Amino acid sequence: MFSKQQMAERAAQEISDGSVVNLGIGLPTLVADYLPAPSEDGSGVWLQSENGILGMGPFPYEGDEDPQIINAGKQTVTITTGGSCFDSATSFTMIRGGHVDLSILGAMQVSQSGDLANWAIPGGRVMGIGGAMDLAAGSKRILVMTSHVTKKGEPKLVAECDYPLTAKGVVDRVITDLGVFDVTPDGFRVVELAPDVTLDEVRAKTGATVHAD
């Protein structure tokens, strides 16, 4: 199986040089530790946070935290050389205008048709959808990072979501602790299996069609 850090490192491999990327709260925030900082020529990866940062860096070392510099999940972060801060209205204009190349989001469920549910559990406490809907609709590509099953052992990759949807048909690829999977018209396609994970195990823990070319 992939550890959380291995999932983050694998997700970092999905990011092209020079991309503008938004990292959702939770697991996706770990990806920042595996990305090259932007350079003066614009290469590297530019992390965008919907609360108003472009050029967000990794988490600060203990003792170096600045409480004024936080990500959308209210965690202290850093800003790379050349980075900038602006109001959330400008940030959402970037997102809704299609200027974010990739968003890496967490999820409670992903359907085999690419539907995303990542903001509410029926019967649970609801904090609001936040920027997830805008990111799902406005980003050029959506990558999901999540555990393959819930703490109760229920599949998160399903034939059809029964949690409130964030967006329909937007997810392109999913990275879980069991492997990497593409959303296709025929269900989830195995791109890569985590160490010591078998296809039979994946199928047993997935509530949808799984195929390997």
Image: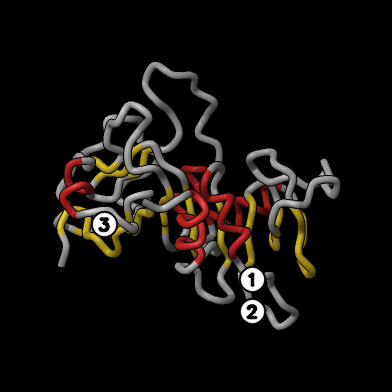
Q: How is the image coloured?
A: secondary structure
Q: Residue at x 56, y 53 (%)?
A: 23
Name which residue lies at 27% across and 36% down: 155
Residue 27 location (% of width, % of height):
52, 46
For label 2, the residue is 43
Name the element at disc 1. loop
Is 48 placed above or below 68 here?
Answer: below
Nearer to me, 64 or 48: 64
Contact (CB < 8 A) between labels 1 and 2?
yes
Q: Position of residue 82 (x, y in %)?
A: 78, 69
Q: Residue at x 16, y 50 (%)?
A: 200
What residue would you read off at disc 3? 183
Query: Quadrant location of residue 140?
Result: bottom left
Q: Position of residue 149 (x, y in %)?
A: 32, 37
In the depicted view, which residue is nearer to us: 23 or 26? Answer: 26
Calculate the distance from the C-alpha at mark 1 to the C-alpha at mark 3: 28 Å
Q: On residue 36, which mark appears?
A: 1
Residue at horizontal 59 percent and vertical 63 percent from the top: 34
Identified by mark 1, the residue type is Pro
- Is residue 204 left or right of 27 when viewed as pictured? left
Q: Amino acid at mark 2?
A: Ser
Residue at the limit of the structure toward the bottom, as seen here:
41
